[in-house]
Amino acid sequence: MGRILPIQAILMMVFWVAAATVGAIEVPAVGADQMVVTATMTPKELTDVPGAFEVITAEEIEMTGAETLDGVLEGALGVVLESVPGRGRIPQIRGLSNKRVLILIDGMRFSSGFRDTTVDVSEISTEFVERIEIVRGPSSALYGSEAIGGVINIITKSPPSDPSGSLAVRYGTNTYGEAENTVVKGAVGSTFGPLGIIAYGYANGSDEFDRQYDDYFSDIDDEDRYSGGIKLHLDLADEHRISMGGYYNETSREGLRPKNSTITDRDADSDRTNAFIQYAGHIAGASVMLRSYYSQFQLDRNYTDIGGMNPNNRYAYEEFDINNELYQVEGQVSRVFAVNHLLSLGLEYREEMRSGVENRGETEVDETIDNSAVFIQDDFQLLTGLQVTAGLRLDDHSDFGSEVSPRISLIYAIRDNLRFKASYGEGFRAPSLYELYVETINMQGDVMPNPDLNPERSKSYEAGIEGEFGRFTGKIMIFKNAMEEMITKVRTGSRTSGSKTIPIYEMGNVEDAYTQGGELEARLQLSDVLSLTGNMIFIESENDETGDDLLDVPEIKSYLRLAYLNGSAGFKGNLRMNYIGRQFIAADNRVGGYTEWDIYAAKSIHKNFEIFAGIDNIFNKTVSSTASRGGFYYGGVKVSF
């Protein structure tokens, strides 16, 4: 990329090369025997998963100290979090963001969120998460639209076999003694014969924080989050199970905003509801899954004081009263044929609705789209040591007709502990209801919808090697995502508001764009209790029409974690470094790279009682392009029973 590498990236590469030469003590590959499902929709051991794949376990989640999902994803390879309107955070994978990354909960979609965001991951509590499975690379052959860049699947905890539960309380404050934060959370569950049940609750309250008073814009809003959920299963007979459950999250944000020469508080209240029912079992030698689910997002946002504003001026005030809903029914059958072929067939139907007022002074939006799909996948051994996974999906969209998405992946076992992996996939993304129909009026720029948009299409390639060598586990991979008809904002003019010129954009298709780069991932078991883990991604991106880099795509991202885990002493902790490289946040505004350091430690006083503490952003790093509460100190206790 023709630029000097930051010291963090150099350290990561030195660690990777040096660790690869170490191999005296045999340590099993981390998670090698763990069964995962997202990459193929069928259970596989981690070493047998095609393509680029990562699992973040419950233990790793706990040792980040993160209360919500965004804090966990910061350390994931190739994942970068963007700040979006409404103070949300959404992930990108390999430089492809927002609607190009599909976020699932137990394999199920969420309804879309505020404006054109998919899911604000800062709203999702880690309390009920068992693990997170991340597929980097095209997954449209299984999941359809929005899976061009990859998939993040949040796997929730299942009912425990015996009665058990937990309760935790945490308090924190930042470097300035502000942004006070209190968290209370807990879970309880058990299995009673054929019935298993688990329930959880979570409450998180944070005070407003503002260090730049002269801009009349809160750095961090006063925020309250509440969530809860329940999940149960009923075993009808051997290998037949009915599952059902629900999840609810409520977020309330209030903060200072400048508004047409008036300084006022802005209230934003949102809630998200998910519910499902599912059958899974074995019939005539086949694994069968049938499922129906519902997801809803609602938001009510307004200004508490609009004194001095003219309600007849569409630019002078705003009203947001949004209701987004998603219904989906689906089924999947998997069966072994001809000894060597695991065939999977899936069918699904989805309906998405967007209604309410989502712009300033405009009439109500009320639009619906639906999508039907069928997919087939064959997982088979072609030659000794060569495993092939081939899939094809046909989508029929109510507005855009039929789209075909193929994918083929292979794994070749060079040795028992060394594998070559390669994949090719094609994908598509249908324009969202927001891009098609919703107008946005904003002091940073008006965005006009475009009902004549074409779907995005992609061709993606990746290849790499992974293996385990004594105490060392490592992966290296290169990739390219070539995009056609990518949907983005195209400037069409401007308007004036007082002395300020406001740009006007329209959603449009860019003929060609791409992201490409390389990934490194490594883990070194330094001793029985000490380990060093790191990952790094290099990304090059370009809009071929303009020759500019894509927005919000960093050149480099790297992550290092030194972890200590001593079960006999009841102590665990880690030190983490996260570096985000330079990136464009606007056509003429590139922000420099920055590094954050975090630390976490926990000590078991008794088998059922633990104390913990941590510091996020140890050196109080501030970043102009994102809202930050600065250095943050926290501590708490956890009781298990």
Image: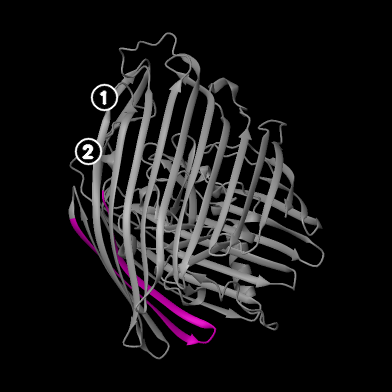
Q: Nearer the viewer, mark 1 or mark 2?
A: 1
* Residue kind at label 2, given as amino acid type: Asn
**Residue situated in front as seen by the camera: 584 or 76:** 76
Q: Quick check: can you spot residue 608?
A: yes
The answer to whether 335 is drawn above or below residue 61 in the figure is: below
Callout 2 environment at 10 Å: few (<14), some (14 to 19), or many (20+)?
Answer: some
State the image coordinates of residue 164 (x, y, percent, origin top left): 67, 57
How far is the residue under mark 1 from the one under mark 2? 17 Å
The answer to which quarter of the image holds residue 314 is top left
Q: Which residue is mark 1?
A: 363
Q: Secondary structure at mark 2?
A: loop
Q: Residue furthest top?
A: 308
Q: Please say whether residue 262 is one of the residues in the magenta stretch.
A: no
Q: Secondary structure at mark 1?
A: loop
Residue depicted at x 38% and y 40%: 587
Q: Is residue 117 left or right of residue 526?
A: left
The answer to whether 119 is drawn above or below residue 491 in the figure is: below
Please tell me which of labels 1 and 2 falls first in the chain.
1
Magenta range is 402-430
Q: Which residue is mark 2?
A: 450
State the image coordinates of residue 190 (x, y, percent, origin top left): 61, 58
The answer to whether 324 is drawn above or below residue 94 in the figure is: above
State the image coordinates of residue 589 (x, y, percent, origin top left): 44, 39
State the image coordinates of residue 67 (x, y, percent, origin top left): 61, 46
* Residue kind at label 1, given as amino acid type: Thr
Q: Quick check: can you spot residue 2?
A: no
The C terminus lies in which quarter of the figure?
bottom right
The answer to which quarter of the image holds residue 374 is bottom left
Q: Please say whether residue 409 is one of the residues in the magenta stretch.
A: yes
